[in-house]
Amino acid sequence: MAHHAGARLLHRLRRSLGGGDTREPGRVNHISLGSHCHMAQALKRAGLRTWSGPFDWIFSSPSMVRHCLADDFATLLDPAQLETTPLAERRNPEEGRGRHKHYAAHHGVPFVFNHHDPASSPEDYQFLAEGVRRLRAALRDRTTQNRFYLLDAVDTPEATFSDICVALAQHGEGNHLTVFRIEAGAAEPVLDDLGSSRADLRCVRLATRSPTVGLRFLDPADDAVLLGFLQQEARRVTR
């Protein structure tokens, strides 16, 4: 019975985050760069996420994103770097299922694949590869407007985000990154524009009542502030 319940959970998550997605990038794209599936889910709830990318359903870090863009995802997709997490090392059988040797050793991401395991599942590997293909396609077309978003709760130096923007800028002027710096524990959710040293980078402080717990904040009021910002951003981009 527990096995069937776990399978249903994985099926719902795959549907929620775009498993089997046949949609492709368009003229304007709103794309999650992690650092986990909360960002992709927020874009979906805001009506902005129209196709699935590689960072929609994995754990990452800003430095890992920077590395993925720098080597065009070759390391992320390298089968030799993928391994199944032993059951004894998981919090439960259906979480932390897959690891990536390079990103665990060099970027502090112990479990890149939470509910999937591309090391043992050809379907999961194909799901990952298709997400990479779509993101590459969005970047390859230099006439597109690509809006990238990243949730950061570890106070990453702005230089890392600048490096990401430099990598994106190599694919055209239509690429822009918005970083949400999460600070949990506020009395009320507050969103402040911190600005940045680059025109293609926007750093936003998002003070929240609650922490992020997977697909959402623990307090719905925090997600309401984030969604309001995303919807406002979409109206600005499409003018």
Image (cartoon, rainbow, N blue to C red):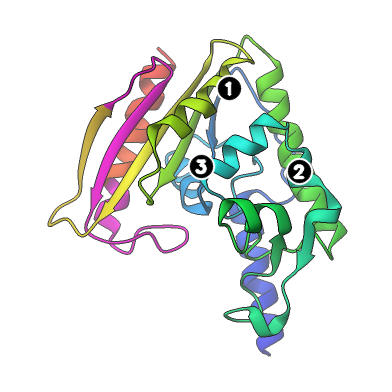
The residue carrying pointer 1 sits among few (fewer than 14), some (14 to 19) or many (20 or more) residues within 10 Å by Cα, namely many
Q: Which residue was labeled with disc 1?
A: 168
Amino acid carrying label 1: it is: Leu
Residue 204 drawn in magenta: yes
Picture coordinates of residue 81, whole percent (x, y): 79, 55
* Contact? badges 3 and 1 (CB < 8 Å): no
Question: For this rendering, which residue is in front, 29 or 159?
Answer: 159
Amino acid carrying label 2: it is: Thr
Picture coordinates of residue 84, whole percent (x, y): 77, 69
| Quadrant of the rendered image containing residue 235 | top left
Estimate the spatial distance between the alpha carbons at disc 3 and disc 1, rounded to whole Å.
Answer: 14 Å
Left or right: residue 212 versus residue 90 is: left
- Which label belongs to residue 75? 2
Query: Magenta segment range?
Result: 195-224
- Which label belongs to residue 31? none
Which residue shows up at 29% across the image and 58% down it? 220
Secondary structure under the numbered disc 2 in the rendered image? helix
Q: Is residue 149 above or below residue 221?
A: above
Q: Which residue was labeled with disc 3?
A: 62
Question: For this rendering, which residue is in front, 64 or 57?
Answer: 64
